Image (tube, helix red, strand yellow):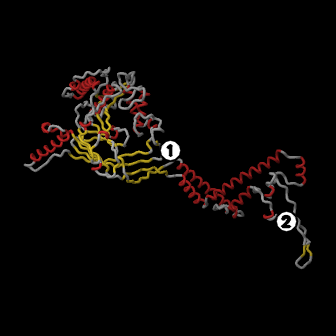
Amino acid sequence: MALTPGGSPKSQEAQPPLPPLPEDRRQERLVELHTSFRELFTFFCTNATIHGTIRLVCSSHNRLKTASWGLLFVGALAALYWQFGLLFEQYWRYPVIMTVSVHSERKLFPSVTLCDMNPHRPRSACHHLQVLDEFARENIHSLYKFNFSGDRDVLCAGDRVPLPAFYLDRTIRLQRLSQPGHQNKVGFRLCNSTGGDCFYRAHSSGVTAAREWYHFHYVNILALLPTAREDSHRSHRGHFIFSCQFDGQDCQARHFQTVHHPTYGSCYTFNGISAKQHPGITHGISLVLRAEQQDQVPLLSTEASIKVMIHGRDHTPFLEHQGFSVRPGTETTIGIREDEVHRLGSPYSHCTTGAEGVDVQLLYNASYTLQTCLVSCFQQLMVETCSCGYYFYPLPSGAEYCSYTRHPGWGHCFYRLYGDLGPHRLACASRCPRPCRESSYKLSAGTSRWPSSKSAHPEGWQEQWSQRALCVQDWILSALGKRDPRSLSQNPGLRSHVAKVNIFYQELNYRTVDETPIYSVPQLLSAMGSLWSLWFGSSVLSVLELLELLLDAIALALLLGCRWLRRVQAPSPGAATGASRGTPEANQLPTDGRNDINPRGGPCQPHPPQRSREP
């Protein structure tokens, strides 16, 4: 019974259900889960900070809007992760950009290597070289009907040195080729040790073919000499370097390192000892050099010049790759600009900080460079493939140099192997990384005639000025060479046997080229945040909300799965009877979240109904 506002009683047939207990009267649980996935999803869409999710709930009474917003949400999510995939694909390629910067500080002067292009004749092989010279004259005469003048045999007169056993392979001779693909070319044929595989080393230039042919026989002779080569420069540095000044002071003998090259003759490497504070020609190195070929080996060195190479300190000079020639009778001025390259290394680029991490045993006692690694790798492959080493490169331990006296057919093996080195078909290209830090030198050169001479004067004065110029030249050459001026006047050609070289820093500013990653970790996170904000307008905390939704969904799925398994696998008869009388069916889930988890870990008992009190 209930009272009306007038005070009369009014009866009700059914009492409405009582509202649930207020939140503050419920017992707080350590873990509370939603009763269904629908409730979980509704709670997430209502409270998440991701744009567009609340539309899925607010439009629940309009299925068309709900479906539209659902498709938009899924489409935006798919586009976001598609762009994430593209972003990570580009990041895992580890792309870099090159950043150029300019610095100014004191720099050590680079090393300068100079060669006199006058390879000498080893006394122990002098007779064999005479036989080779005669064979070369026969080949050239048969091709071009040209006769050499002079007798080279006098060079070995009086020598009493034991000669190594050697025979000249006269089957390897210069030929004018007529085979398909080699018409109008000159070359020579090389075969393997069995003679079953042959090919021609052909050149369109007869001079190039003759030099390479002579060089091949020349190497076979030198390979028979003892490994400890004789002192080829003979301590005659003063006969090649007339004068040397570095930073305004005379050079000392300790500044030079001397080595003999079979092709380039005696080579001298100058190592500066101080860091340069000022640029300019007066603060560099100035040399006066002799370019005179007294013991020239014919066809081996066909140019009268001086070979020069500028390289890093403690680096092996490879003049055949990076050297340049200085013409006699000129003054050559070379300005240097230095560039440094800094590479990042793995995983951005394949480089090394030294020889320790390289799978190649370096044969040079010098700093690591790409060229030293390639040459060392090639020489080791040469020893493994051809059973001998190339004479121009250092030998691995236990190996010997190639000569067709001991290794027939080695030339065929060498040229085949060397032909694969250029196109990077050998494993050396992948086994030899570039240095992570290396310097390169940009050169700019200018030349002028030196010593000076009068080339053109008004009529009547030309002869007088020419005689005066000749006197100036004779005086300079006499002072440099400490020779009798009368011999210079009688042989004016001596003026073309000297050259002056000036090498200096044009400026102390140098460029560094640094590899910079396009996507570092902070840049990657920034790009991901930009894409996330573009499609959903949210932040990192929104991602944590998605993570929370995922964890809640997994926990709810596990809980419901465990309850279903318990009810299916272990039903009790009493529970079944009770269920038939008044309990809900097993497939019906409770609607109150308080019954999901109790402190004991099982389903909680329903609360007793609350009765209202009548006034």
| Residue 169: quarter of image | top left
Mark 1: few/some/many CA within 10 Å (<14, 14-19, 20+): few
Question: Can residue 183 be spotted in the picture?
Answer: no
> Where does the image place residue 277, in percent across and percent down from the top left?
34, 52
Q: Is 183 left, or right, of 598 in this rendering?
A: left
Residue drawn at the location 36% of the way across and 51% of the way down: 106
Marker disc for residue 18: 2
For the N terminus, which image quadrant? bottom right
| Residue 269: quarter of image | top left
Q: CA distance from mark 2 to mark 1?
A: 70 Å
559, above or below 296, in the image: below
| Residue 329: quarter of image | top left
Q: Is 552 left, or right, of 96 in this rendering?
A: right
Q: How many marks?
A: 2
> Where does the image place residue 196, in percent across and percent down from the top left?
39, 22
Disc nearest the viewer among 2 and 1: 1
414, above or below 450, in the image: above
Mark 2: few/some/many CA within 10 Å (<14, 14-19, 20+): few
Question: Can residue 158 be spotted in the picture?
Answer: yes
> Where does the image place residue 320, in percent across and percent down from the top left?
33, 37
Residue drawn at the location 38% of the way across and 40% of the way down: 314
SS class, disc 1: loop
Q: Amino acid at mark 2?
A: Leu
Q: Nearer the viewer, residue 525 or 567?
A: 525
Residue holding disc 1: 346
Residue drawn at the location 25% of the way across and 39% of the way down: 241
Q: Is 535 left, or right, of 7 in this rendering?
A: left
For the C terminus, which image quadrant? bottom right
